[in-house]
Amino acid sequence: MLRLPEILLIAVYVAPTVWAVSDILRITAETWADSEQNQVLWTVIVLIIPVLGPLLYFFIARPKLIEPA
């Protein structure tokens, strides 16, 4: 059974990463090209850097992706 620290670990590390990767994959390749961002690079960043990767994606790449839409 999971204890509170383990649940918090999942919430802090896994949930933002899953959200960011699902958001990256949801956006079309055309939108990525229009915003001059690299979908594969952002996926790798989010997966390799657990907490900072999703934050970087949210504050750097996502605003540029939403802008053309």
Image: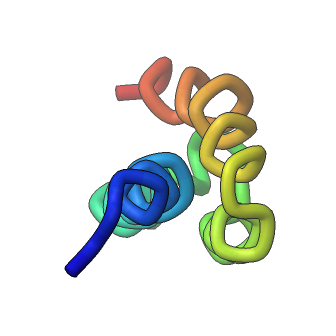
Foreground of the two, 49 or 12: 12
Quadrant of the snapshot with the N terminus: bottom left
Q: In this view, does 63 lie to the left or right of 56?
A: left
Q: Where is residue 19 in the image (x, y as percent from the top left)?
A: 36, 53
Q: Is residue 64 left or right of residue 7?
A: right
Quadrant of the snapshot with the C terminus: top left
The color scheme shown is rainbow
Q: In this view, does 1 lie to the left or right of 46?
A: left
Residue 61 in view (yes/no):
yes
Q: Position of residue 57 (x, y in %)?
A: 65, 42
| Residue at the farthest left position | 1
Instruction: Say above or below: 67 vs 57.
Output: above
Instruction: Say above or below: 49 vs 2.
Output: above
Foreground of the two, 20 or 51: 51
Q: Which residue is drawn at 61% across and 47% down?
A: 54
Q: In which quarter of the image is residue 56?
A: top right
Q: Is residue 63 left or right of residue 30?
A: right
Foreground of the two, 31 or 50: 50
Instruction: Say above or below: 47 vs 12.
Output: below
Q: Position of residue 35 (x, y in %)?
A: 63, 39
Q: Residue at x 66, y 62 (%)?
A: 46
